[in-house]
Image (cartoon, rainbow, N blue to C red):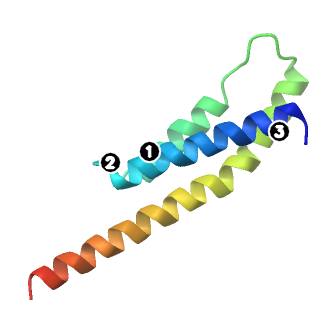
């Protein structure tokens, strides 16, 4: 694994952790907003990068982020399901 791949993986892990905080917090229903914001940030230009390397890095970043964001979405769905079940139990 190259330094670039490791760096991207580290950032993906950071995003996963931040996403987990989002899932547990007040904006837990806004996973679509989180994903859109993250993907938009990945698509920005990097000073000093050649167009070819930027395109390759962007593609790689999206490939790494896809399973991370899928896990965040799954966590949100699980958390929301538990909350819905707790609300149903509380009303009976």
Q: To which residue does mark 2 refer?
A: 27
Secondary structure beneath dot 2 equals loop
Residue 51 picture location, percent across and down: 86, 21
Sequence order check, earlier mark of 2 and 1: 2
Q: To which residue does mark 3 refer?
A: 5
Above or below, 44 relative to 7: above
Alpha-carbon span between mark 1 and mark 3: 26 Å
52 vs 25, left or right, is right
Q: Residues within 10 Å of mark 3 (few under 14, many from 20)?
A: some
Q: Which quadrant would residue 42 be assigned to in this image?
A: top right
Q: To which residue does mark 1 refer?
A: 33
Mark 2 or mark 1, whichever is nearer to me: 2
Instruction: Work out which residue is located at the far bottom of the displayed protein and give it.
Output: 92
Alpha-carbon span between mark 2 and mark 3: 30 Å
Q: Which quadrant would residue 14 be assigned to in this image?
A: top right
28 vs 3, left or right, is left
Sequence order check, earlier mark of 1 and 3: 3
Q: Which quadrant would residue 10 be assigned to in this image?
A: top right
Secondary structure beneath dot 1 equals helix
Residue drawn at x 44%, y 44% as measured from the top left:
33
């Amino acid at each position: 694994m190259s330094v670039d791949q490791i760096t991207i993986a580290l950032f993906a892990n950071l995003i996963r952790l931040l996403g987990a905080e989002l899932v547990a917090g007040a904006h837990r229903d806004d996973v679509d907003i989180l994903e859109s914001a993250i993907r938009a940030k990945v698509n920005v230009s990097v000073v000093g990068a050649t167009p070819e390397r930027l395109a390759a890095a962007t593609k790689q970043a999206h490939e790494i982020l896809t399973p991370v964001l899928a896990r965040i979405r799954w966590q949100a769905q699980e958390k929301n399901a538990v909350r819905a079940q707790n609300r149903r139990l509380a009303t009976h």
